[in-house]
Image (spheres, helix red, strand yellow):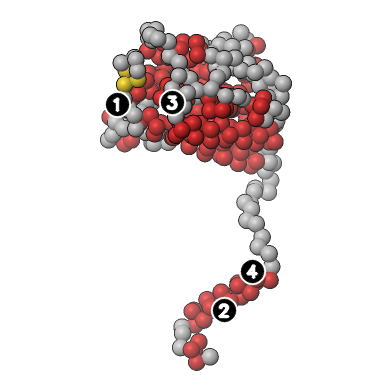
Amino acid sequence: MALLLSYKPQIVVFMVLMVSCTASTASFSPQPCKPTFPQKSLPLYEKDIELLQFPVNLEFLEAEFFLWGALGHGLDMVEPELPNEGPPPIGAQKANLDLLTKNIITEFAYQEVGHLRALRDTVGLFPRPQLDLRTENFAKLFDEAFGYKLDPPFNPYSNSLNYMLASYVIPYVGLVGYVGTNPLLQGYRAKRLLAGLLGVESGQDAVIRMYLYERAKEVVYPYNQTVAEFTIRISKLRNKLGKDGIKDEGIFVPMKLGAEGRTSSNVLSANSYSISYERGPEEILRIVYGTGNEHVPGGFYPKGGNGKIAREFLKKY
């Protein structure tokens, strides 16, 4: 008691509260912390479902490309219910990956399976669209990026570096699509799902870009072009197809486009405020179709995407 009286009153109160809190937690099981949602808001609005089903097209593409590249098989073996009776991808195959790259892509692959499950449980899945993952399709894309036919044709499955360059083509499109969708969502459950998906997609893109950044000056055999140049060409092609200015950048940029105009290093692609670019469904389709026209299918989706938004564009074709 004499010891307590020697302390300031504030400290005595603090010690009493600590003892009380300890006794309380010892008597009762801890309650899980849950976010407080707006009382007048719905978890999911009808429009949210349409908006969040659209990127299912991209999640199917990423899941199949990564699963096949790392494991040599796709969703039909890993999670056969998710494709929802959609046709298997064309031309997908196991890539010749070193251990580091295989571990990265394997993790990405299973993450994409989780994304599809999350979307299924929240907004539902449509059947997997027809996907074209043939080497010829990637070769055509890289030829267009460089403005001439690469010799031999680019093969994404031949080695780790080629595979990561091909991977550079895919997740970033989904990332900027999620950023564009974000302000259009209303329901708190829809927003939570998108935030979670965007976080992991951004991480995947950062890993791919850092992998290539570390090899920026390496010449991609036998094309006599550096890794950095490959990323710049692909990004320029996506800007061209998207038809809405610069929203995509390689791992090096002119100084004026770097962070605060003070660096040409560009590990993360971002706008003049160093925040992520955004794209709408029209731009996304123009890019992944490879046609520059949201009404004309092709590229990774020879028969077009699925879901209400993608099919509405196809009706005008």
Q: Nearer the viewer, mark 2 or mark 1?
A: 1
Q: From the top left corner, tell me how far across and down residue 258 is, in percent.
A: 32, 32
The reply to whether the C-beta atoms of the residues labelled 2 and 4 are less than 8 Å apart is: no
**Element on which disc 1 rests:** loop
Q: From the top left corner, tell me how far across and down residue 194 is, in percent.
A: 58, 36
The residue singled out by tag 1 in the image is 217
The residue singled out by tag 2 in the image is 16
The residue singled out by tag 3 in the image is 160
**Element on which disc 3 rests:** helix
| Rendered image quadrant of residue 148 | top left
Amino acid type of the residue that numbered disc 2 sits on in the rendered structure: Val
Circle 2 crowding by C-alpha within 10 Å: few under 14, some 14–19, many from 20: few
The reply to whether the C-beta atoms of the residues labelled 3 and 1 are less than 8 Å apart is: no
- Residue at 67% from the left image edge and 17% from the top image edge: 87
The answer to whether residue 295 shows anywhere in this view is no
Q: Nearer the viewer, mark 2 or mark 4?
A: 4
Circle 1 crowding by C-alpha within 10 Å: few under 14, some 14–19, many from 20: few
